[in-house]
Image (tube, rainbow, N blue to C red):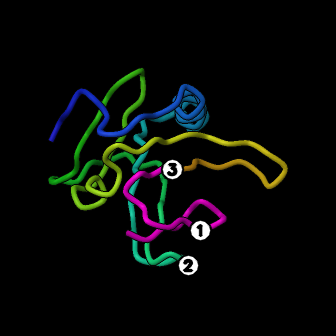
């Protein structure tokens, strides 16, 4: 399914980092954002670069980047914000999720 607007906010810093990662790989890739069971909160966020789109994926192309999300994961991200953070601990994408009841200190797991 193609949509033209993200069901969540994505910061300029995150958009710029996605563009850098795709350019570095020198092939057309999309950022997959997904949620799996695990982590200290019960669910955890995942990010990876992929070439292909699955039949049921939600495909978003905006601001020069392409994002794919499976329909189940998208339900947990509605209204959230994706950012990219660099600090003494390292660098990573982070999710600020209003749907999460609790989040882990690492920022990668949550519960609903």
Q: Is residue 5 above or below residue 45?
A: above
* Mark seen at residue 95: 3
State whether the magenta stretch is mostly helix, strand or loop. loop
Q: Is residue 7 left or right of residue 33?
A: left
Location of residue 45 in the rendering, given as x and y in whole percent from the top left corner: 47, 61
As drawn, the label of residue 13 is none
Q: Within 10 Å of the Cα at label 3, are there few (<14), some (14-19), or many (20+) other Cα atoms? A: many
Which residue occupies the foreground of this view, 69 or 27? 69
Q: Secondary structure at mark 1?
A: loop
Disc tally is 3
* Residues at marks 1 and 2 touching, judged by CB atoms closer than 8 Å: yes
Give the residue at x 53% y 35%.
Answer: 18
Relative to 37, 75 lies left or right: left
Using the image, determine if residue 40 lies above or below residue 50.
Answer: below
* Residue at the image position 34 percent from the left and 43 percent from the top: 79
Residue sitting nearer the eye, 89 or 70: 89
CA gap, disc 3 to disc 1? 11 Å
Residue farthest toward the right in the current orientation of the protein: 88
Rendered location of residue 109, percent (x, y) = 52, 67
Residue 83 falls in image quadrant: top right
């Amino acid at each position: 399914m193609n949509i033209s607007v993200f069901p969540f906010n994505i910061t300029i810093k995150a958009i710029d980092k996605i563009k850098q990662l795709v350019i570095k790989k020198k092939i057309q890739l999309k950022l997959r954002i997904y949620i799996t069971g695990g982590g200290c909160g019960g669910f955890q966020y995942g990010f990876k670069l992929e070439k292909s789109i699955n039949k049921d994926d939600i495909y978003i192309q905006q601001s020069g980047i392409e994002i794919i999300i499976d329909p189940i994961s998208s339900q947990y991200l509605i209204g959230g914000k994706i950012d990219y953070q660099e600090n003494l601990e390292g660098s990573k994408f982070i999710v600020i999720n209003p749907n999460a009841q609790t989040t882990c200190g690492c920022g990668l797991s949550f519960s609903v």
